[in-house]
Image (tube, rainbow, N blue to C red):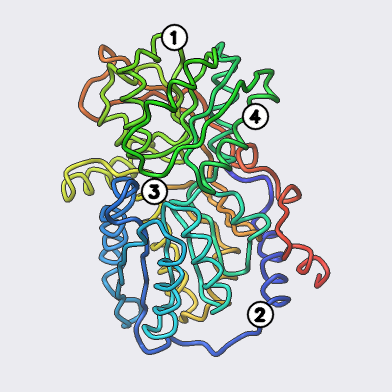
Amino acid sequence: MRHPLSVARLALFAAALTCALAPAQAAGISDNVIRIGFITDMSGVYADGDGPGGAHAIRMAIADAGGQINGHPVELLVADSRNKADVSSALARDWFDNQKLDLLIGGTSSAASLAMSAVAAEKKRPFITSGAGSSAFTNDQCNPYTIQYTYSTRGLARGTGAAVVREGGSSWFFLTTDYTFGHELEHDTAAVVKASGGTVLGSVRTPLGTPDFSSFLLQAQNSGAKVLALANATADFVNSLKTAVEFGLTRTMIPVGLTATLLDIHALGLEVTQGMYFTVPWYWNKNPDSEAWSKRYLKDIGRMPTYGQAGDYSAATSYLKAVSQTGTDDADTIMAWLKSHPVNDFFVDHGVIRADGRMMNDMTLLRVKTPAESTGPWDLHKVAAVIPAETAYGTLDESTCPMLKTAAKAQ
């Protein structure tokens, strides 16, 4: 779906932003090598949703580009963030200072990715987050070198929250992972629920990666809410929903996976998840090109990709295209090009990267099929609604990104 803000207008705005905030540098490929770094959860609770599979997706992007751009080889560095902000920022700093890194891609943990974003801004190097959902990336903590590529907590909330209230889920209780991502996901979804006429009866914060959700789910049960909102992801989502089923909560409460992925549904099975709504920016059979790429990935990895892994591929491909078209890995030139050229690939149709760094991609509300409806191991969902990008993320005027004011003054 074409975003209502014209590409031409965005190009002018991006150019003004670049001129206002950073000086031009010499063209060319620094060090004669294009180096991409990837820091994400490689071994913890979010590893299945991104992790080694995300690294493989980026390697696919590099291979599809021929392994080089204009005769310059493309290299990939990979490290485990351990979902820690200090570890991630230290790795990012070392790679920028000592490995001559040209692009950093970060995934999953919002706290870790926000820390990397700050380092990238300091070093004036591009940073693309594919797996982190905090809306802060394009609001109070935005900067000229960061792109939030795949989704945000606000986008997920606007898809799932309103739909569940319409289906009778009028009262909610949140089971929320206790860090930036979970807090924002609960906040954004609660706002949508209330605006849709629903109520929030309570919430409880759970440690990241906790093995025992029993006491937290008892609080949810005692709340009397109709909806059990799981504001967590991947392993935490799977484990909390499994426990909820064991406790019998799903017989009296509607489970809602606010960041459920295809892998989660596949792991839990349709008997457990049937009828559940969840919102995604992409799914494996979204279109013929998505299905073709996903089947390549399935052949290599043995399972379908998540939207975060597809976003990793698309983000890396977009960057490499920018380098190819401009003939340089200069950060300011690359950022200006990315913000003035739409992305058209299997992941997004006419995706525009706004001046605040938000990739404007539509979101899709899915509903899990019943076992009788499914025709195969990965035929797990059906489309309930498509949420246009501007509805999901809000308009540029709604962004609180401070650098937009600087750009406006420069025009």
For label 1, count other residues whose C-alpha is less than 10 Å away and answer few (under 14), some (14-19) or many (20+): few
Q: Amino acid at mark 4?
A: Val
Q: Position of residue 119 (x, y in %)?
A: 52, 73
Q: Tags 2 and 1 in contact by the CB under 8 Å rule? A: no
Q: CA distance from mark 3 to mark 2?
A: 30 Å
Q: CA distance from mark 1 to mark 4?
A: 23 Å
Q: Amino acid at mark 1?
A: Thr
Pair 3/4: label in front = 4
For label 3, count other residues whose C-alpha is less than 10 Å away and answer few (under 14), some (14-19) or many (20+): many
Q: Position of residue 12 (x, y in %)?
A: 71, 66
Q: Is residue 323 left or right of residue 78?
A: right
Sequence-wise first label, 1 or 3: 1
**Residue 224 sits in which quadrant?**
top right
Which quadrant: the C terminus?
Answer: bottom right
Q: Amino acid at mark 3?
A: Gly
Q: CA distance from mark 2 to mark 1?
A: 56 Å
Q: Secondary structure at mark 3?
A: helix
Q: Position of residue 272 (x, y in %)?
A: 30, 19
Q: Position of residue 139 (x, y in %)?
A: 67, 54
* Residue drawn at x 16%, y 43% as measured from the top left: 302
Q: CA distance from mark 4 to mark 2?
A: 37 Å
* Residue drawn at x 49%, y 53% as measured from the top left: 110
Disc 2 marks which residue? 22
* Residue drawn at x 43%, y 73% as measured from the top left: 90
Disc 1 marks which residue? 252
Sequence-wise first label, 3 or 4: 4
